[in-house]
Each structure stands twice: as C-alpha cells, then as structure tokens.
Amino acid sequence: MALIALAADKGSPGVTTAAVALAAVWPRRVLLAETDPAGGDLVYRSAAAHGGPLNPNTGMLSIAATARRGLVPDQLWDHVQPLSGGLEVLVGLGNAEQAAGLAGLWPTLGRAFAQLADSPHAPADVIADCGRISGDTPAVEMFSQAALVLLISRTEPEAIARVRDRAAALSAKLHGGARGAAALGTPLIGVVLITDPGESGKLVHQVNDMLVAAQTGARVVGTIAEDQAGADQLAGRKRGRLDKSLLIRSARKVTSDLYQQFGAAWAVPAAGGPNGQPTAGAGR
C-alpha cells in the first residue's frame, strides 16, 4: 500500500503546493486527494482537462454517500476528475461545514486510499492533502493507514517549533509514544522543509537535531524549494518551463529519495505508466 498523507501545523502554509508538486512528478500512477476538512483549493484555482472548471460536487462531497454503504478502492475512480495536464484529483470539500457529511468515514477513506495500490484493475498510489491539522482534525483518523505521513514546514523558528511538537504528538497518537514510533516505523513520520535551496543543507541538520533531541521519532526526509514563480506556474497562473523550475526540481529530488528508501515496499505495478511530466495544479 502507498498512502502518503501531507499536513502542516498552524502558520505553515504550503501543503497543497507541495502535494501537487510531488504528485506531478510521482514515478507511478497517482491520485491526488484533497482531504482537508476545512475545504479544498483546486476547484477554484485549476482547470479541468476539458478546459472548463472542475465540478465541486464530484470528489470528496460525492464520495460521502458511497462510503456510507462501504467503499471498494476502485470506486474512488468514479469520483475523480483529471486536471488540465492529466493529473487525476479527488476534489476537496467546498467548506468546513460540509465535513459533517464525512463524520465517521475517515478511517474508511484511509483504508480505501491505502488499498488502491493493490487494485487488480487500476492501481495507484494516493497523495492526500490534509491541510492544516490539530489534535481534533478528523483527517488524522486516516493516518494509521498511511505508509508515510509528511509534515510540511517552513523554516521560521516558530514553524520549526510547531512541527517538532506536532511530530511528537502524532508519534504518541499513532505509536503510543516516540519510542514506539522509532521501533515500529509505520507509518513513518517525515518532515519536508520549504526553504531557500542555498540554506537547505544546514537547516536539515539543525531541524533533525531538534527532532532527535525532542524524541519525536520523526526526521527530515527532504526539502522543497521556496519558489513563488514555480508555484504560480504549477497553479496555471504563469507561463514558463515548469519542469525547469526550482520547485519541480526539488520535488523530483524528494520523490527520488523517498522511492530509493521505501520503493521496494510500494513495488506494485501501476497501470497507466509513470507520471513523469509536471502537471498544472494549484498552490495554497
């Protein structure tokens, strides 16, 4: 299985940009799911493959009725829309009030996302954009089904402090404490830093030292470039060679490193070939 859940703490925007960038260069077929209970952004910022707008009623909103009767992983595809460029997305809720319709269904969704890689018909990994999380965010109920939970953080001191505390809290929730997380390792809790590429090496060491000292059981697994021009290209707001942007180049490095470390465990042949070309999406 390969459900990769992305999230951030208060004051650390960038989850959707990171999720779309990673999905755009993911080496296997991938489904990008907007699972932020507060609502998604793609429907407002991205065009559908047919050139018109995405349908806000097809996605997380439409899947709620299906999931209440039980959810087979392949049924996810009935609620997916392709973006201009081909990236397949499960559009998020329109607002936080609609999250009530998914009450009690988050574990069911997590299992379906995790099992999609084993589908005999249309296997795919799932990258879930969970937005900003707190202790009572219902999307966290999916995390136990994930192969990897990635916390996205900027590098201001307050952001690093928050990601350290959030990693420790998730370790306690998912593994019964930091020692359990270090020993069990599934789902691994990783940190992805959004930073100036010139400072990434030094910052990775500093943040890793902080995570270890706090016994979070988490570690930095990569960095994504702070690249507004690339984010605008990814969102379709600006023209340019997206594949040459710092954003996409750094996203490729993160995905390459993740697959080098964990790809053997995710080695289920995927239909449809690799997702090798960057695809226009949206940035948060």
Image (spheres, rainbow, N blue to C red):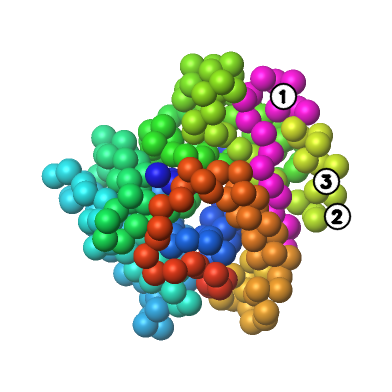
Image quarter in which the C terminus is found: bottom right
Q: Which residue is mark 1?
A: 212
Query: Is residue 91 at least partly visible in the picture?
Result: no
Tell me the amino acid under the disc marked 1: Val
Query: Residue 31, relative to residue 206: is it above or below?
Result: below
Question: Is tag 3's residue or tag 1's residue first in the polypeptide sequence?
Answer: 3
Q: Measuring 51% from the left and 46% from the top, which residue is drawn there?
A: 264
Query: Is residue 248 at least partly visible in the picture?
Result: yes
Pinpoint residue 198: horizontal percent, then vertical percent.
86, 55
SS type, badge 2? helix
Among the 4 quarters of the image, the one containing residue 162: top right
Comparing 220 with 1, the one in front is: 1
Residue farthest to the left?
A: 69
Q: Which residue is mark 2?
A: 198
Q: Measuring 56% from the left and 64% from the top, which residue is drawn there?
A: 25
Mark pair 3, 1: CA separation: 17 Å
Mark linked to residue 174: none
Whether the magenta-drawn stretch holds residue 61 is answered as no
Tell me the amino acid under the disc marked 2: Gly
CB contact under 8 Å: marks 3 and 1: no
Among the 4 quarters of the image, the one containing residue 166: top right
Query: Residue 52, relative to residue 101: is it above or below?
Result: below
Whether the magenta-drawn stretch holds residue 223 is answered as yes
62 vs 126, left or right, is left
The magenta stretch is: 209-227
Q: Which residue is mark 3?
A: 201
